[in-house]
Amino acid sequence: MTRARWIFLRAYLLVASLVVVTGLGLEALLVERDHQALIQREAALIEGAFLYSETLLDSTAAVDTVDLGQRLEQELALPSKLYRVEDFAVLEEGYEQLAAGETVQMYDTDDRPVFYRRLNNSPWVLALGPAPALDNERAKWVVPLFYALIAVAVYLWIRPLTKDLELLRESAQAFGQQDFSSRVSLPQGSWLAPLADAFNSMAQRIQWLLQSHRELTHAVSHELRTPLARLRFSLEMLAGAEAADRQRFRDAMNRDIEELNALVEEMLGYAELEQDNLTPQLEPLHLASWLTAYADYYNSHAPAITLTVASLPKGCIIPADERMLTRALDNLVGNAQRFARSRIQLNARVADGVCHLHVLDDGPGIPQEQREAVLSAYVRLGDNGNETRKGFGLGLAIVKRIVELHRGDVTIAEAAGGGADISMDIPL
């Protein structure tokens, strides 16, 4: 027997046993309650039958015991028979009760109750009973049918549940065997659908963390190795250099240290943005004022290429975390400075409830087949070995993450006249 069938059989037997035991207990309780109610109704029926019999006896001029007994049995729908009081003299206590007009209950040879009572102080004692047993044909199959339906219902409930549990177990087992693409696919109507969604979310997060770890390891092994090698070379050269050359080697070492520091800051910044509990502090941000002030501050530091601001929507206010969005804009403008020839431009427009903030340059642009890839971490233009690599491959990934935290998206297109057109699309 397979594990899945064994799990199903155990669950089915457990639930079915609980249902049967509960059903039998309730059935016994109800039978006992109905039995007591039946006794009360039977006593009331017998009392009424005796009263009717006394009335009938008073209206009969001559008593024919056989005829009267048959008539009573027909009209009362109970076995009826007349006896004389003296026939019960041997009973002593029972005789005294009958003589006093009390109802006496006795049992026949089949242990069925028969009721006796003297009628109107007459010499006659009427015996009623035993009542015929109720032979309800429906009751013979209703209870088995009930339990059969319960068994079917339990089966229909347990079987899909155990199948879903088996799928969840198989996916968890595959994931534990380093198949990190393993996911659970359950119908949304399944009771385990929330658990499957939680598992898939966890699996996706773990897969991303492992991928990020591999990317980080790859980046560290490649990015740190070059400046560290240069530092080692400069140190070795510095030891035997002439006094006139020592400053040149010190400057080279400082540049390498700054490069290492920038790389570490980029990595830490990207890791910070990937935290699930990071929530931007969204506040109303006046777009035109913010972009104008940004361009003025940027140009005040005498960059190699001046940043110009083109058309801006008047009165446009977006919900944004100004610190985070400024960081994203820094990355876009910084990329444009590295690749542009003579022009970097900012412009914005609003369409269909979305603010499109564009950063354009007149550099070589981004090939269409690479536009999606460069938004991932540690992916850079020029990684094909034919071009000079620039940056650490985290700038656009950070931009994408910041815009996603603002419930927006990043699009890359070709600028008019050539170059890159990168847009941060943020809903208003």
Image (cartoon, rainbow, N blue to C red):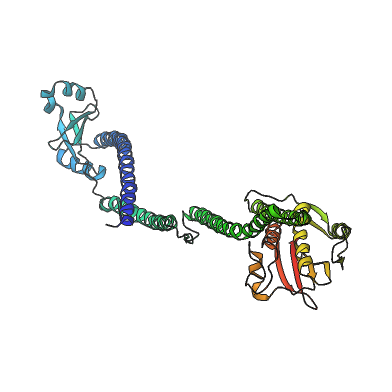
User: In the image, what residue occupies the spot 18% across and 37% down?
Assistant: 112
Q: Residue at x 74, y 49 (%)?
A: 281
Front one among 163 and 96: 163
User: Residue 405, how many percent across, how many down?
Assistant: 69, 56
Indicate the position of residue 154 as horizontal and vertical percent values. Answer: 36, 53
In the rendered structure, the answer to whether residue 13 lies left or right of residue 224 reads left
Q: Is residue 285 above or below residue 396?
A: above
Give left or right: position of 54 versus 214: left
Residue positioned most to the left: 90
Q: Quadrant of residue 176?
A: bottom left
The picture places residue 171, in percent across and down from the top left corner, at: 43, 58
Q: Is residue 332 left or right of residue 44?
A: right
Looking at this view, is 339 or 385 the one in front? 385
Residue at 29%, 35% in the rendered image: 39
Whether 182 is drawn above or below 53: the answer is below
The quarter of the image holding the N terminus is bottom left
State the image quarter where residue 205 is shown. Answer: bottom right
Q: Residue at the location (80% across, 78% down)?
A: 417
Give the total of numbered labels: 0
Instruction: Give coordinates of residue 369: x percent, y percent.
Output: 64, 75
In the depicted view, which residue is nearer to us: 187 or 239? Answer: 239
Visible in this render: residue 177?
yes
- The image quarter in which residue 51 lies: top left
Instruction: Tell whether 423 sits left or right of 36.
Output: right
In the current view of this chain or complex, which residue is farthest to the bottom? 417
Report whether residue 357 is seen: no
